[in-house]
Image (tube, rainbow, N blue to C red):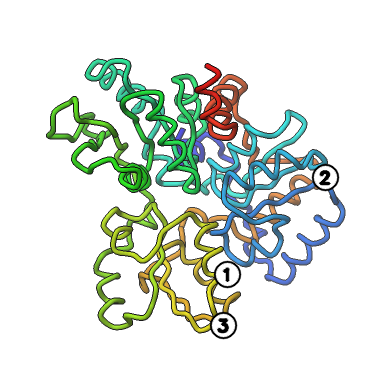
């Protein structure tokens, strides 16, 4: 279900007018009081891309899967208010216990990439690809996908991947089958497969809108089928941005996220997950100069936290992730006050069947896939 459909289904998800007139200081004071009153029963994870006004109240910050795992390990928390986007809250609900409830402060906080692969498109594509290639394909999905897509991958023998472990999981997948279907981000899939030695000529793209496989080579050479999806933020970093840096500031290092287009990753000095980027900047020597190709809230936070370095965005016209930024102080306060008075709303609940199958995909990623192959 897309975020648009979800919003239509829940007519009460729109922020009440009274929260729009509160001052920042009043909202902050009320949030602090609720956190204090609920104590260990409340846990607020905040994704790296959240605004500072929200991150200041986060009990933990990190990437989506990391935060979901932290939620699962926090057995004291009855209420988990996930400051991120919809698929992240879904993953937290999948990994936590039935005694824990996961909330999303604004139900409109979605992910355009995740919405580029819905279950109906995926099942239709899978039927076509099975007819064309037979039982030679293992599906993989980026954790930036809906619970339904994770469940699809789980029941078809595949696994989830993160930007940190994508190489390891793709190598594992090729030990199982001749081909992989990589959902929903074509750029991470392409960059990862290329990194382990797969030729670009051996990669096809499945177009879910036209319902066709974009590939001109012999079928026998096709090793990777990339879903035609992308991150709306990271796709906006370009080789022109890199050319401008190289011509004007050749001493500035360029580091980007692997959700960026292949040519951008290839022309950068380094690339890696959000955590990798943070770690590289943290470890860098004072006075070093960086152009970072990732979400603007994080770039600005790194710039503020590492004033000993010269940090800019690779794309100076980049804006923050718009859907991630739907989580703000008014929505966070509304969500918390609803919990406090026993009228909780914006609950994220994945049904047990979907959760079980999605867990299969997550487990294959988390629990040493190579050992599973030996024990199979």
Which residue is tagged 2? 41
- The image quarter containing residue 166 is top left
Callout in the foreground (2, 3): 3
For the residues labelled 1 and 3, say whether their Cβ atoms are less than 8 Å apart.
Answer: no
Instruction: Give the label on residue 282, or none.
Output: 1
Nearer-N-terminus badge (1/3): 1
Nearer-N-terminus badge (1/2): 2
For the residues labelled 2 and 3, say whether their Cβ atoms are less than 8 Å apart.
Answer: no
Residue 61 screen position, x and y as percent:
65, 56
Spatial CA span between label 1 and label 3: 10 Å
Callout in the foreground (1, 2): 1
Front in this rendered view, residue 191 or 127: 191
Label 3 element class = loop
Residue at the image position 57 percent from the left and 70 percent from the top: 283
Spatial CA span between label 1 and label 2: 33 Å
Residue 246 screen position, x and y as percent:
28, 76
Q: Is residue 4 above or below residue 56?
A: above
Label 3 crowding class (10 Å Cα cut-off): few <14, some 14-19, many 20+? some
Residue at the image position 32 percent from the left and 80 percent from the top: 250
Report the number of numbered marks: 3
Front in this rendered view, residue 52 or 165: 165
Nearer-N-terminus badge (2/3): 2
Residue 194 screen position, x and y as percent:
30, 45
Q: Is residue 255 above or below residue 209?
A: below
Spatial CA span between label 2 and label 3: 39 Å
Which residue is tagged 3? 308
- The image quarter containing residue 372 is top right
Label 1 element class = helix
Q: Is residue 272 left or right of residue 107?
A: left
For the residues labelled 1 and 2, say whether their Cβ atoms are less than 8 Å apart.
Answer: no
Residue at the image position 50 percent from the left and 25 percent from the top: 151
Q: Is residue 107 above or below residue 284?
A: above
């Amino acid at each position: 279900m897309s975020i648009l459909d979800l919003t239509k289904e829940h007519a009460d998800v729109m922020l009440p007018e009274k929260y729009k007139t509160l001052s920042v200081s009043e909202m902050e004071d009320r949030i602090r009081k609720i956190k204090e009153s609920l104590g260990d029963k409340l846990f607020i994870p905040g994704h790296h891309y959240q605004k500072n006004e929200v991150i200041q109240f986060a009990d933990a910050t990190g990437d989506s899967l990391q935060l979901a795992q932290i939620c699962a390990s926090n057995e004291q928390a009855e209420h988990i208010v996930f400051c991120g986007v919809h698929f992240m809250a879904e993953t937290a609900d999948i990994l936590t216990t039935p005694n824990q409830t996961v909330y999303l402060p604004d139900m409109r906080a979605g992910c355009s990439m995740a919405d580029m692969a819905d279950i109906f498109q995926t099942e239709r594509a899978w039927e076509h690809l099975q007819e064309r290639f037979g039982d030679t394909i293992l599906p993989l999905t980026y954790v930036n996908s809906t619970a339904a897509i994770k469940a699809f991958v789980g029941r078809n023998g595949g696994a989830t991947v993160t930007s940190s472990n994508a190489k390891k999981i793709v190598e594992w997948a090729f030990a199982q089958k001749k081909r992989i279907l990589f959902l929903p981000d074509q750029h991470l899939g392409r960059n990862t497969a290329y990194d382990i030695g797969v030729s670009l000529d051996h990669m096809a793209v499945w177009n879910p809108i036209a319902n066709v496989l974009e590939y001109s080579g012999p079928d026998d050479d096709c090793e990777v089928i990339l879903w035609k999806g992308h991150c709306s933020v990271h796709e906006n970093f370009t080789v022109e941005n890199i050319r401008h840096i190289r011509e004007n500031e050749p001493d500035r290092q360029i580091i980007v996220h692997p959700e960026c287009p292949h040519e951008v990753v290839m022309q950068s000095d380094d690339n890696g997950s959000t955590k990798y980027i943070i770690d590289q900047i943290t470890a860098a020597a004072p006075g070093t100069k960086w152009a970072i190709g990732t979400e603007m809230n994080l770039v600005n936070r790194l710039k503020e936290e590492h004033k000993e370095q010269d940090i800019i965005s690779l794309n100076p016209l980049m804006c923050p992730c718009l859907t991630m930024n739907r989580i703000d102080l008014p929505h966070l306060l509304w969500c918390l006050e609803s919990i406090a008075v026993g009228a909780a709303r914006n609950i994220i609940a994945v049904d047990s069947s979907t959760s079980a199958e999605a867990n299969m995909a997550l487990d294959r990623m988390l629990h040493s896939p190579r050992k599973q192959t030996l024990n199979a």
